[in-house]
Image (cartoon, rainbow, N blue to C red):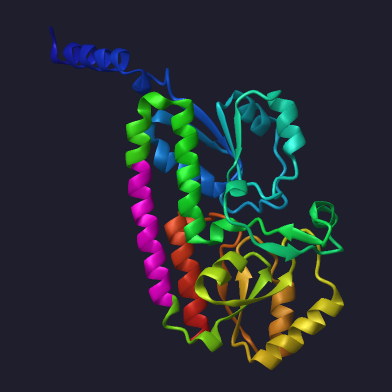
Amino acid sequence: MTIEKGVFMCLMFILLSNPLASGADVLKVASFSTLLTEIAQKVGGNHVNVAGLVKPGQDPHEYQPTPDDLKQAADAKLILLSGKHIEHYLDKIQQATGGKGESLSVGDALPNLKMKADPDEPQEKAAADANGMIDDPHWWNSVANVEKATTVVRDALIKLDPANRADYESRAKAYLTKLEALDQWAKRKVAELPRDKRKLVTSHDAFQYLAKDYGFKVYAIEGVSTETEPSDRHIAELIDQIKKQQVKAIFLESTLNPKVTVEITRETGAKIGGTLYADGLGEGDGSTYDGMIRHNIETIVDALK
């Protein structure tokens, strides 16, 4: 037997004896969140094939599933949704899948923040409760929430594929260890900034979970969603607040037009502090969750010090 033939036969034996290597038993997952795509890949490893349908740098508030996205969701055993009403296309997913597969709104299992609905935003108004309040969907800006989300995804994978429970638990534990280290780093970095300087002006209201964890006060130009332009009255009130609070820096966001933010800096004298990743993973520094949080925290603290 030649060496080449021996190598070929060895590879064929591995493929036939290991269903995962041939893709036979790989669990198909469709994810409508960049962050959940990362979690599923980290926890699932080679036991899963994750289709990330919302791409890095895409605004999840404005995303609409394509026919191919819906087909991939229909073929999946597990559909991961961010939850807290950010997916306004659930009816399309339901139609495409016909109720097949496990659909999991991860954010709905996590601690919640309530916010005042924007009366000028139809989707927010429709989702509001009797008191005019809505769920803040930006749960991923809390590292503690992402730790909880990891366990939710881990348990869902174990439920669908109990034979690989030990692997899912081991991989989740490793990812959780990194998240805990990230949270400790963030607390140390934020501690460099005096509490009276923790005033965060952002393009839209996406950082309330981060603010709660690390002691910031948020002043947002747009509301929870990015789909409605802020009113002139709101802009005027915000300019007054920035001047009154002597806010040093205003932050842009990677998925939003900076025009209004730049105009506010002219009116207030505040500088542009940098660009933040607000709505999920992006390019460059924000291509991983660890990188996104480190980029955001460093950008905020260094600009406001």
Percent x, y of residue 146: 49, 53
Q: Quadrant of residue 226?
A: bottom right
Say which of 111 and 303 sits in front.
Answer: 111
| Total labels drawn | 0
Q: Position of residue 111 (x, y in %)?
A: 58, 56
Whether residue 187 is in magenta: the answer is yes
Quadrant where the N terminus is found in the figure:
top left
Instruction: Measuring from the top left, give residue 204's x and y in whole percent.
Output: 69, 67
- The answer to whether residue 288 is above or below residue 14 is below
Secondary structure mainly formed by the magenta segment:
helix
Which portion, as a residue range, is magenta? Answer: 171-189
Instruction: Answer above or below: position of 155 versus 23.
Output: below
Is residue 189 in view?
A: yes
Of residues 194 and 151, the one drawn nearer to the viewer in this rendering? 151
From this viewpoint, which residue is outermost toward the top? 1
Residue at image location 79% in from the left, 52% down from the top: 127
